[in-house]
Amino acid sequence: MTEMIRAEKLEFQVPSRNILSIPELVIEKGHVYGIMGPNGAGKSTLLKLLSLLEAPTNGTIYFHGEKVSAQTVTLDQRRKIAIALQQSLLLDSTVFQNIAVGLKIRKQPRKVIKAKVFEWMEKFNIAHLADKHAYKLSGGESQRVNLARAMILEPELLCLDEPFSALDFPTKMKLVEDFKSILTTSGTTVLFVSHDLLEVKSLTNELFILMNGELQQHGSTEDVIANPNASTQSFINEWKSYLTL
C-alpha cells in the first residue's frame, strides 16, 4: 500500500497536561480508519493534527513524504484534505448552492459545477432536495449535504469528526450504509472519529484505540474488536455489552 501520512514522535501539550503522545503512526492510501477511545483520549486533537488544522507541540508529520505542518501547508496540499464535522454548518442557501460552494471557490466552469453537483446529489440520494433551503432540512438530510459538499472536491483524505452522532439510529445506519458504498468506489482515505462501535464496525477496515493520549492498539477493525489487548479490553468490552443489550 502507498503511505499517505506518517507522524513521528507526535506530541500535543497544553500548560496543564499532555494531550497526545504517539511515537509513530502511519496512514495508508485508500484505507478507512476508525479512531476510538474514551472522552478526553485525544481523538479530535489527533484528527486536527493529521488534517493539518493544528500544529503539534513536538514531532513531525509527513504528507506524501514531505514534511508539513499547519503553518507550512501549501494550498495544493490543503485542497487534498476535506473535513466534515458533527454539526453540518450549512450556508444560508439551497442544497445545490451548499454542495457547489467548494467548486465555485476553485473557479470551476458553471457547466462542470452543475454536472458534478447533480452527480453527488444522486450518490447521496438528495437530488430531489436541490432547491430546498438548507435550514429546512432534517438532521439526516443536512449531514448528507455536508458529506456531499466534502466529497465533491474529490479529496485524497477525508476527516470525519462524529458526523453521525446526532442522528437517530435508523437515519444513522442508512447514511452509514450509503456512505460506505460511496467510499468503496471513490478510493478516498478516511479518518473517522467516533464514539459508536457499531458505526466503526460498519464503516472502517482499520481501527486506532486511544487511551489517555496514547495509541494503545491498532489493527484491522475486526481483529481489534475481537481481540482487545490488556489496555483496551475494558473500553471495547463495555461497548460490546452495550451492543448486545
Image (spheres, rainbow, N blue to C red):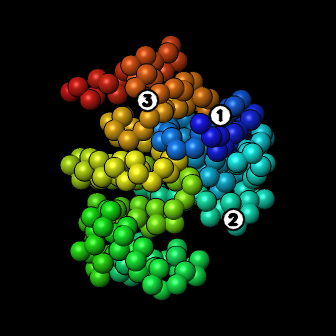
Q: Total number of numbered labels?
A: 3
* Residue 243 spot, x, y in % from top left: 26, 29
- Mark 1–mark 3 distance (CA, rounded to whole Å): 16 Å
Q: Secondary structure at mark 2?
A: helix
Q: Are marks 2 and 3 in contact (CB under 8 Å)?
A: no
Residue 29 location (% of width, % of height)? 57, 44
Does residue 101 appear left or right of residue 128 in this picture? right
- Judge whether 102 appears above or below 125 on screen: below
Q: Quadrant of residue 199?
A: top left
The residue located at (40%, 47%) in the rendering is 184
Residue 145 as seen in the image, left or right of residue 56: left
Q: Is residue 109 visible?
A: yes
Which x, y percent locates residue 106?
Answer: 59, 77
| Image quadrant occupied by the N terminus | top right
* Residue 97 visible in image: no
Q: Position of residue 2 (x, y in %)?
A: 63, 40
Residue under circle 3? 221
